[in-house]
Image (cartoon, helix red, strand yellow):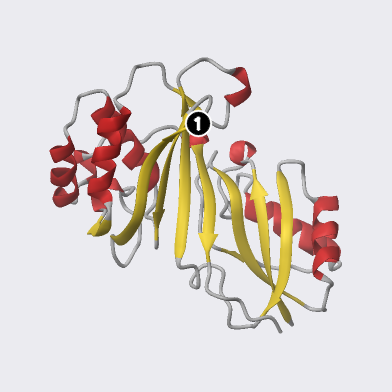
Protein backbone atom coordinates (compact mmCIF):
# COMPACT_ATOMS: atom_id res chain seq x y z
CA UNK A 1 0.00 0.00 0.00
CA UNK A 2 1.20 3.50 -0.84
CA UNK A 3 0.05 6.46 1.27
CA UNK A 4 -0.84 9.68 -0.54
CA UNK A 5 -1.35 13.12 0.94
CA UNK A 6 -3.97 15.03 -1.06
CA UNK A 7 -4.95 18.70 -0.99
CA UNK A 8 -8.48 19.64 -2.00
CA UNK A 9 -10.72 22.69 -1.87
CA UNK A 10 -14.49 22.61 -1.63
CA UNK A 11 -17.57 24.76 -1.47
CA UNK A 12 -19.50 23.41 1.48
CA UNK A 13 -22.96 24.71 0.62
CA UNK A 14 -24.37 21.39 -0.59
CA UNK A 15 -22.78 19.23 2.11
CA UNK A 16 -23.51 18.38 5.70
CA UNK A 17 -19.87 18.99 6.56
CA UNK A 18 -16.69 17.06 5.85
CA UNK A 19 -17.31 13.98 7.96
CA UNK A 20 -19.37 11.03 6.76
CA UNK A 21 -23.04 11.23 7.77
CA UNK A 22 -25.40 8.24 7.48
CA UNK A 23 -28.34 10.16 6.00
CA UNK A 24 -26.84 13.33 4.48
CA UNK A 25 -24.22 14.13 1.82
CA UNK A 26 -20.70 14.85 3.05
CA UNK A 27 -17.45 15.83 1.35
CA UNK A 28 -15.70 12.74 2.72
CA UNK A 29 -18.33 10.39 1.33
CA UNK A 30 -18.19 12.08 -2.08
CA UNK A 31 -14.41 11.71 -2.38
CA UNK A 32 -14.42 8.13 -1.06
CA UNK A 33 -17.02 7.21 -3.69
CA UNK A 34 -14.63 8.45 -6.40
CA UNK A 35 -11.79 6.29 -5.07
CA UNK A 36 -14.15 3.32 -4.87
CA UNK A 37 -15.08 3.76 -8.53
CA UNK A 38 -11.42 3.88 -9.55
CA UNK A 39 -10.64 0.63 -7.74
CA UNK A 40 -13.57 -1.48 -8.87
CA UNK A 41 -16.05 -0.61 -6.12
CA UNK A 42 -13.53 -1.44 -3.40
CA UNK A 43 -14.00 0.65 -0.25
CA UNK A 44 -11.10 3.12 0.05
CA UNK A 45 -11.31 5.09 3.34
CA UNK A 46 -9.69 8.52 3.61
CA UNK A 47 -8.58 10.35 6.76
CA UNK A 48 -9.10 14.10 6.85
CA UNK A 49 -7.19 16.82 8.67
CA UNK A 50 -10.29 17.66 10.71
CA UNK A 51 -13.99 18.22 10.40
CA UNK A 52 -15.92 21.17 9.04
CA UNK A 53 -19.57 21.74 9.82
CA UNK A 54 -22.47 21.86 7.40
CA UNK A 55 -22.17 24.79 4.99
CA UNK A 56 -18.55 25.58 5.87
CA UNK A 57 -16.07 25.87 2.99
CA UNK A 58 -12.40 24.95 2.63
CA UNK A 59 -9.88 26.79 0.50
CA UNK A 60 -7.25 24.27 1.56
CA UNK A 61 -8.07 20.88 3.08
CA UNK A 62 -5.84 17.81 3.34
CA UNK A 63 -6.47 14.10 3.71
CA UNK A 64 -4.38 10.97 3.46
CA UNK A 65 -5.32 7.75 1.73
CA UNK A 66 -3.68 4.33 1.32
CA UNK A 67 -3.94 3.05 -2.24
CA UNK A 68 -3.32 -0.53 -3.39
CA UNK A 69 -1.13 0.60 -6.29
CA UNK A 70 1.33 3.37 -7.04
CA UNK A 71 0.00 6.33 -9.01
CA UNK A 72 1.66 9.31 -10.61
CA UNK A 73 0.60 12.21 -8.40
CA UNK A 74 -0.55 14.47 -11.24
CA UNK A 75 -2.51 11.67 -12.87
CA UNK A 76 -4.19 10.88 -9.55
CA UNK A 77 -5.43 14.48 -9.26
CA UNK A 78 -6.52 14.44 -12.90
CA UNK A 79 -8.49 11.24 -12.32
CA UNK A 80 -10.17 12.62 -9.21
CA UNK A 81 -11.11 15.90 -10.87
CA UNK A 82 -12.73 14.01 -13.75
CA UNK A 83 -15.08 12.33 -11.26
CA UNK A 84 -15.56 14.93 -8.52
CA UNK A 85 -18.51 17.34 -8.71
CA UNK A 86 -17.82 20.99 -9.62
CA UNK A 87 -17.82 22.12 -5.98
CA UNK A 88 -14.84 19.91 -4.99
CA UNK A 89 -11.39 20.22 -6.57
CA UNK A 90 -8.24 18.12 -6.13
CA UNK A 91 -5.30 20.53 -6.09
CA UNK A 92 -2.25 18.32 -5.56
CA UNK A 93 -1.17 14.92 -4.29
CA UNK A 94 2.13 13.58 -3.00
CA UNK A 95 3.54 10.28 -1.81
CA UNK A 96 4.29 10.20 1.92
CA UNK A 97 5.50 7.65 4.45
CA UNK A 98 2.96 5.30 5.99
CA UNK A 99 3.42 7.06 9.36
CA UNK A 100 2.26 10.42 8.08
CA UNK A 101 -1.17 11.47 9.43
CA UNK A 102 -3.24 14.30 7.94
CA UNK A 103 -4.83 15.20 11.26
CA UNK A 104 -2.24 14.54 13.93
CA UNK A 105 0.78 15.99 12.10
CA UNK A 106 -0.78 19.40 11.41
CA UNK A 107 0.87 22.09 13.55
CA UNK A 108 -1.23 25.15 12.69
CA UNK A 109 -4.67 25.72 11.21
CA UNK A 110 -6.06 28.99 9.91
CA UNK A 111 -9.70 29.94 9.41
CA UNK A 112 -11.22 33.03 7.83
CA UNK A 113 -14.73 34.31 8.42
CA UNK A 114 -16.05 36.68 5.75
CA UNK A 115 -18.56 39.46 6.38
CA UNK A 116 -19.95 42.08 3.99
CA UNK A 117 -22.10 45.10 4.85
CA UNK A 118 -23.55 46.06 1.49
CA UNK A 119 -26.02 43.74 -0.21
CA UNK A 120 -24.20 41.67 -2.83
CA UNK A 121 -25.83 38.67 -4.54
CA UNK A 122 -22.43 37.34 -5.62
CA UNK A 123 -21.40 36.75 -2.01
CA UNK A 124 -24.66 35.08 -1.05
CA UNK A 125 -23.33 31.76 0.30
CA UNK A 126 -19.68 32.65 0.97
CA UNK A 127 -19.95 35.72 3.20
CA UNK A 128 -22.38 36.89 5.90
CA UNK A 129 -24.41 39.98 5.05
CA UNK A 130 -24.44 42.09 8.24
CA UNK A 131 -25.91 45.58 7.86
CA UNK A 132 -25.36 47.12 11.30
CA UNK A 133 -22.37 49.38 11.82
CA UNK A 134 -19.47 47.79 13.68
CA UNK A 135 -16.47 49.18 15.55
CA UNK A 136 -13.75 47.03 13.98
CA UNK A 137 -11.03 48.76 16.02
CA UNK A 138 -12.69 47.58 19.23
CA UNK A 139 -13.20 44.13 17.71
CA UNK A 140 -9.49 43.91 16.89
CA UNK A 141 -8.53 45.02 20.37
CA UNK A 142 -10.83 42.35 21.81
CA UNK A 143 -9.39 39.73 19.46
CA UNK A 144 -5.97 40.26 21.02
CA UNK A 145 -7.37 38.92 24.30
CA UNK A 146 -7.70 35.53 22.60
CA UNK A 147 -3.98 35.12 21.94
CA UNK A 148 -1.93 32.54 23.81
CA UNK A 149 -2.67 29.16 25.37
CA UNK A 150 -6.08 29.20 27.01
CA UNK A 151 -9.14 27.12 27.81
CA UNK A 152 -11.62 27.98 25.02
CA UNK A 153 -14.51 26.00 26.53
CA UNK A 154 -16.74 29.09 26.42
CA UNK A 155 -16.55 28.98 22.63
CA UNK A 156 -17.05 25.24 22.17
CA UNK A 157 -20.16 23.43 21.07
CA UNK A 158 -21.74 21.67 24.05
CA UNK A 159 -21.56 17.90 24.62
CA UNK A 160 -18.58 17.22 22.37
CA UNK A 161 -16.11 14.50 23.30
CA UNK A 162 -12.63 16.03 23.56
CA UNK A 163 -9.78 15.41 25.98
CA UNK A 164 -9.17 19.12 26.56
CA UNK A 165 -10.47 22.55 25.65
CA UNK A 166 -6.96 24.01 25.76
CA UNK A 167 -5.85 25.60 22.48
CA UNK A 168 -2.96 27.88 21.54
CA UNK A 169 -4.09 30.87 19.50
CA UNK A 170 -1.26 32.34 17.41
CA UNK A 171 -3.09 35.09 15.54
CA UNK A 172 -6.51 36.79 15.55
CA UNK A 173 -7.33 39.85 13.44
CA UNK A 174 -10.07 41.57 11.45
CA UNK A 175 -8.86 42.60 7.98
CA UNK A 176 -10.50 45.00 5.51
CA UNK A 177 -10.60 44.15 1.80
CA UNK A 178 -12.07 46.11 -1.09
CA UNK A 179 -15.63 44.90 -0.61
CA UNK A 180 -15.79 43.11 2.74
CA UNK A 181 -14.10 42.24 6.03
CA UNK A 182 -12.73 38.93 7.20
CA UNK A 183 -11.66 37.63 10.59
CA UNK A 184 -8.53 35.47 10.43
CA UNK A 185 -7.57 33.21 13.31
CA UNK A 186 -4.71 30.69 13.54
CA UNK A 187 -4.24 28.09 16.26
CA UNK A 188 -2.73 24.68 16.85
CA UNK A 189 -6.23 23.19 17.13
CA UNK A 190 -9.87 24.28 17.19
CA UNK A 191 -12.90 23.07 19.10
CA UNK A 192 -16.26 22.36 17.49
CA UNK A 193 -17.99 25.62 16.53
CA UNK A 194 -15.16 27.64 18.13
CA UNK A 195 -14.52 30.13 15.32
CA UNK A 196 -18.18 30.93 14.73
CA UNK A 197 -18.73 31.46 18.47
CA UNK A 198 -15.69 33.74 18.69
CA UNK A 199 -16.85 35.79 15.70
CA UNK A 200 -20.33 36.12 17.20
CA UNK A 201 -18.82 37.35 20.46
CA UNK A 202 -16.56 39.87 18.71
CA UNK A 203 -19.58 41.15 16.79
CA UNK A 204 -21.17 41.98 20.14
CA UNK A 205 -18.06 44.00 20.99
CA UNK A 206 -18.38 45.81 17.66
CA UNK A 207 -22.01 46.65 18.43
CA UNK A 208 -21.08 48.01 21.86
CA UNK A 209 -22.91 45.28 23.77
CA UNK A 210 -19.70 43.80 25.22
CA UNK A 211 -16.44 45.42 26.28
CA UNK A 212 -12.91 44.27 25.68
CA UNK A 213 -12.67 43.37 29.37
CA UNK A 214 -15.74 41.15 28.99
CA UNK A 215 -13.72 38.87 26.69
CA UNK A 216 -11.40 37.96 29.58
CA UNK A 217 -14.37 37.17 31.80
CA UNK A 218 -15.98 35.02 29.12
CA UNK A 219 -12.79 33.01 28.65
CA UNK A 220 -12.37 32.59 32.42
CA UNK A 221 -15.95 31.36 32.80
CA UNK A 222 -15.37 28.26 30.61
CA UNK A 223 -19.12 28.35 30.00
CA UNK A 224 -20.63 28.38 26.50
CA UNK A 225 -23.60 30.30 27.85
CA UNK A 226 -21.40 33.33 28.55
CA UNK A 227 -20.33 33.83 24.93
CA UNK A 228 -22.55 35.13 22.13
CA UNK A 229 -24.50 33.05 19.64
CA UNK A 230 -22.59 31.55 16.73
CA UNK A 231 -22.61 33.33 13.39
CA UNK A 232 -23.95 31.52 10.26
CA UNK A 233 -21.76 28.78 8.80
CA UNK A 234 -21.65 30.00 5.20
CA UNK A 235 -19.13 32.79 5.91
CA UNK A 236 -16.50 30.40 7.29
CA UNK A 237 -13.55 28.97 5.38
CA UNK A 238 -10.82 26.59 6.48
CA UNK A 239 -8.09 28.65 4.87
CA UNK A 240 -4.70 27.05 5.47
CA UNK A 241 -2.99 24.20 7.31
CA UNK A 242 0.69 23.95 8.17
CA UNK A 243 2.59 20.64 8.35
CA UNK A 244 6.20 19.85 9.19
CA UNK A 245 8.49 18.92 6.30
CA UNK A 246 7.04 15.99 4.41
CA UNK A 247 9.27 13.05 3.58
CA UNK A 248 8.43 11.41 0.28
CA UNK A 249 9.00 7.73 -0.35
On screen, residue 220 above or below 206: below
Residue at image position (28%, 34%) is 139
Residue 20 spot, x, y in % from top left: 59, 55
The part of the image, by quadrant, that contains residue 164 is: bottom left
The quarter of the image holding the C terminus is: bottom right
Q: Is 185 positioned to the left or the right of 77 in the image? A: left
Q: Please rate how many residues cluster around mark 1, counting C-alpha atoms within 10 Å: few if below 14, some from 14 to 19, many from 20.
A: few
Where does the N terminus fall, quadrant-wise? bottom right
Most foreground residue, 90 or 117: 117
In front of the other: 92 or 227: 92
Task: Please state the horizontal and vertical placement of residue 127, each as a whole percent of the image.
Answer: 52, 30
Label tally: 1
Give the residue at x 51% y 50%: 52
- Quadrant of residue 78 within the rendered picture: bottom right
Q: Is residue 41 visible?
A: no
Q: Is residue 79 left or right of residue 113?
A: right
Identify whether 24 is placed above or below 163: above
Q: Position of residue 4 (x, y in %)?
A: 70, 72
Which secondary structure lies at badge 1? loop
Looking at the image, which is closer to me, 79 or 168?
168
Residue found at x 52% / y 49%: 238
Residue 99 location, x and y as percent? Answer: 58, 83
Left or right of 186? Residue 163 is left
Q: Is residue 80 above or below residue 104?
A: above
Residue at screen point 60% across, 41% down: 12
Task: Choose top left, top right, bottom left or bottom right for residue 41.
Answer: bottom right
Q: Is there any visible trace of residue 113 in the rendered image?
A: yes
Residue carrying label 1: 177
Amino acid sequence: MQRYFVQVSYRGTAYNGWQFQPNAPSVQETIERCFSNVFGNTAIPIVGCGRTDAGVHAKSYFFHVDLPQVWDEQHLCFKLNRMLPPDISAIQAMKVSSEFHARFHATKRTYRYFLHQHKDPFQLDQSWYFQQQLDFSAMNAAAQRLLGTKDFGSFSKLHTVVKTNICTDFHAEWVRTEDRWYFEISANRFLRNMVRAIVGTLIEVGLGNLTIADIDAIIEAKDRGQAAVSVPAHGLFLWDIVYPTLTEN
